[in-house]
Amino acid sequence: MPSYSSKELYDGLVESGLIIPVGVQGIFGRNAVFEDVLARFDQYVSRVAANDGADKMLFPPTLDRKVFEKSEFLDSFPHLAGAVFSFFGDDKKHAELRNRLHDGKPWGDLEGITDVVLTPAACYPVYPSFTGTIPEAGRLVDMQNWVFRHEPSPEPTRMQAFRVREFVRVGTPDVVVAWRDMWLQRGLDIMKSLGLPARSEVASDPFFGRGGKMLAVSQKEQQLKFEVTIPVISEEKPTAVCSFNWHQEHFGKIFEIKTKDGAVANTACLGFGMERVCMALFKHHGFDPKAWPASVREKLWP
Amino acid sequence: MPSYSSKELYDGLVESGLIIPVGVQGIFGRNAVFEDVLARFDQYVSRVAANDGADKMLFPPTLDRKVFEKSEFLDSFPHLAGAVFSFFGDDKKHAELRNRLHDGKPWGDLEGITDVVLTPAACYPVYPSFTGTIPEAGRLVDMQNWVFRHEPSPEPTRMQAFRVREFVRVGTPDVVVAWRDMWLQRGLDIMKSLGLPARSEVASDPFFGRGGKMLAVSQKEQQLKFEVTIPVISEEKPTAVCSFNWHQEHFGKIFEIKTKDGAVANTACLGFGMERVCMALFKHHGFDPKAWPASVREKLWP
């Protein structure tokens, strides 16, 4: 039985050079070994999904602010969101900005909001492109996007910036739910095949404030969110490495997505937290991938 | 002789599905074909650099604000920078935020500055890790990072978010300059081998404000910046696809980087604008890579 410690894992990742601290929690560099593991896991997922016929896309780490505002993310998670501000002033204002900086004084009030925000969830950028009537069989998109969450933490698994391999399904409720269920099993199978003690559970999102508690209870009761979890920094609170969300008509209504029969389309998504999967592998098999069990290496370096 | 038009290139990229508009200028999705070309070019650069012994790293799209403040980027390019703001309020403030959003009113003043900014140049995240005395032979790092520039534009080559394959060299001035010169030739050779009409030129950065013009003149006089350019949207104003910067002691002083003999280390960097290279290829060889000249395909799909 391994023992779990957030600090030991963080220190081990740093000492082995796998991550490179940059001075702020939840932001760090990754070295070539870390990136190779991440790329190999990505390719493994691609092999599992090879015959699904998904449209592959990639979106930048920044998102149209109008899309973000429509998405209602700020209703539920204002504390996790990141908006991009920049400088719109003239030479005089710039002199003030420089003076403030050189005196070590706050300068945020000299900045104004731009038209972009940081991508708050990997699936958000794609919904506007679904607007209209989707084909009979629905839509399936496969992405790998950087996600931002404003939650600085010393826990290595809780990052402010991370990559998510994300699949999004659009269609009728039965199609979308059956697809989610298929991937829940696939997610478990993938993790178990990598020698990781994974299990699935009903989950809820970290909704903001007093009202948020009720939203989380309702989300659980409706079984709208599942997670595949693995103990990485704690036995009692295993880490979600894959997250499955059924949005019902939420995005269909907001972005006016319809099925052939004119009904509001359902959507669901699932995302692998790529860095978390790597960390689960490093925790359970050690910091040197060359020394991992042959059965694990076969899956990642076939 | 091809004719050049920013709008025609943008429309062609959209119509062929290579890029996916998201509603704001300079931010768009990339499809599987675009990403394949980008990955293949990345691998080509890796082959050219294979024996250089670089340390490979990857950093997230967000950077420690303290590092950013020290870097003096805001002195020169405040208008291009992006700072990340988030919500630090309570339930009451959140109610106000929600009301503003639902009424379509501005809400930026309810946000506060966080400890992170968007990475303003691909090399910035790595300098703090050089602090101290570098080895006799200096340091060489190889990265691929997302960069943010607040400059919305209808030109497809002028993006708010893009990837840069970046190499950073740290050492004595002679080592750093010789390395920069070697890569300037390599950059030209790579582009020409891909059938692209590349040339190199002395360049300057888009410094802010009245004083900025003088800084740009001085930068050119000192030959601190070179670019490899290719006509992509204009014959007269070719697009920089690779940029070479000699920072002299700038970062060495700021991040206290010393050579063996105790002198302040010099740094230089070069970066390939990955999306711009792809667009140059699409412009000169067409939107379907399968129909590209055999000599180009051999380099990318060897």
Image: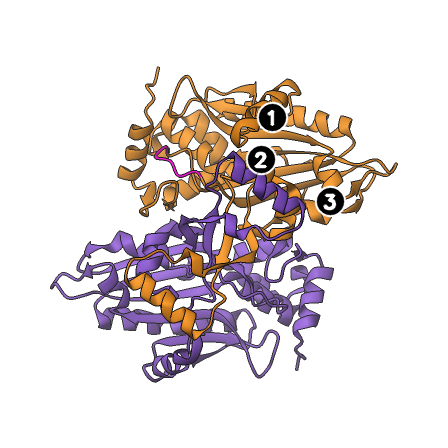
Chain colours: A purple, B orange
Magenta span: B151-155
Identify the mark at residue A301; answer none if there is no mark. none
What secondary structure predominates along the stretch shown in magenta? loop
Marks 3 and 2: in contact by CB < 8 Å?
no
Q: Which of the marked residues, 2 or 3, is nearer the chain's N terminus?
A: 2
Could you tell whether B136 is left or right of A229 in the image?
right
Residue assigned mark 2: B76
Q: What amino acid type is highlighted by mark number 1?
A: Leu
Give how far across and how far down residue B71 sits, in percent.
65, 42
Could you tell whether A80 is left or right of A69 in the image?
right
Label 3: chain letter: B
Label 1: chain letter: B
The front one of B68 and A19 is B68
Instruction: From this view, report whether residue A121 is shown above or below residue B148.
Output: below
- Which residue is at a point 55% across and 58% down the rendered structure image? B114
Label 2: chain letter: B
Instruction: From this view, report whether residue A15 is shown above or below residue B12.
Output: below
Residue assigned mark 1: B215
Residue assigned mark 3: B255
Distance between the alpha carbons at the discs numbered 2 and 3:
18 Å
- Which residue is at a point 21% across and 65% down the rendered structure image? A265
